[in-house]
Image (cartoon, rainbow, N blue to C red):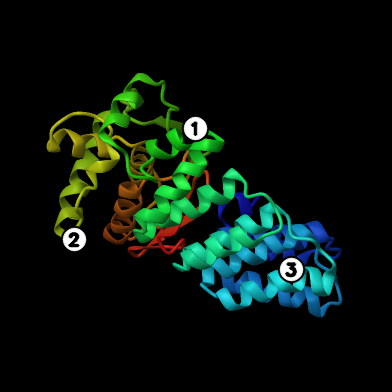
Amino acid sequence: MYSQCGSMENAFMVFNKMLDRNLTSWDTMITWLAKNGLGEDAIDLFTRFKKAGLKPDAEMFIGVFSACSVLGDIEEGMLHLESMSKEYGIVPTMKHYVSVVDMLGSSGYLDEALELIEKMPLEPSIDVWETLMNFCRIHGNVELGDRCAELVEQLDPSRLAEQSKVGLIPVKASDIEKEKEKKKLASQNLLEVRSRVHEYRAGDTSHPENDKIYAQLRGLKAQMKEAGYVPETRFVLHDIDQEGKEEALLAHSERLAVAYGLLSSPARSPIRVIKNLRVCGDCHNALKIISKIVGREFIIRDAKRFHHFKDGLCSCRDYW
């Protein structure tokens, strides 16, 4: 429960008090430490697990690869991939290869990730190509990214369309018109304040304190620009002017949730938000800056991972 809320300090406290820990409890703790950006703690716990004479299962290595990804420790991650079969007799599955590609891609080792995909003894899945495609977008490798996008489209065209909606791949002008004709999957965020759960959708104006929420966002926008924020309007798939696009970015659901959290929660307390899609690039940058301006921690759980925004930084190191 604590892990899924991003409260790892409490989760660790409960784990350490457990008198009887089974494999699932170790798996869970290692995995969620990594998902919350605590890679070093996850690897330390894995080392502690092995020193206790216990044998890891296939699922545990997913958490280990995620931890190495957070740390950017490619060498250790590849050693763990090798040890799976050599030391523990575990045959890597596609899920493991996707995790390793994620690890390589997050540190910019795109060619090495491609080589791994081409040499692995399994038929590459859409997930492994999509993972590499996303990191090509982050690192600016357009040629390889286009190649991955073509393969993703061949395997499942709808997956590529959903990626475009949140700005994970370049969007062609012709594709924008197609997007307008499709029914979008609404971006939703859940925020809990004083034991009440509040739900927000992109562009939502139905909240009773709607005026205060948008006033808060506009006030923060001015401070953000003073801090160097430049709106990434490419994440707005509407044919409107620059000012309109900037206004549309303010209405993204995660920002509405955070703004209300700032208005209604105790000062200096963390704000927790659950999002059903990935955080878009502009909101990710904005939330980093806002966390520094207001001196608060935002814990955002999106479709991919946890993001702990604090003091102008994010636990994902801008790779998600």
At which x and y percent is residue 11? 65, 60
Do the residues bearing badges 1 and 3 touch, measured as CB atoms within 8 Å? no
* Marks 1 and 3, how far apart at CA: 46 Å
SS at circle 1? helix
Who is closer to the viewer here, 79 or 265?
Answer: 79
Q: Residue at x 56, y 60 (%)?
A: 101
Q: Residue at x 74, y 68 (%)?
A: 16
Q: Residue at x 85, y 72 (%)?
A: 54
Is residue 262 in sight in this rendering? yes
Q: Residues within 10 Å of mark 2 (few under 14, many from 20)?
A: few
At which x and y percent is residue 145? 41, 52
Q: Quadrant of residue 161?
A: top left
> Which amino acid type is marked by label 1?
Pro
| Residue bearing mark 3 | 16
Q: Quadrant of residue 155?
A: top right
* Marks 2 and 3, how far apart at CA: 41 Å
At which x and y percent is residue 275? 48, 40
| Residue bearing mark 2 | 227
Q: Which mark is residue 157?
A: 1
Who is closer to the viewer here, 242 or 180?
Answer: 180
Q: Quadrant of residue 169?
A: top left
> Which amino acid type is marked by label 2?
Ala
Q: Earlier in the sequence, mark 1 or mark 2?
A: 1
Left or right, 95 with respect to 73, comes to right
SS at circle 2? loop
> Which amino acid type is marked by label 3?
Asn
Who is closer to the viewer here, 265 or 95?
Answer: 95
Q: Earlier in the sequence, mark 2 or mark 3?
A: 3
* Marks 1 and 2, how far apart at CA: 39 Å
SS at circle 3? helix
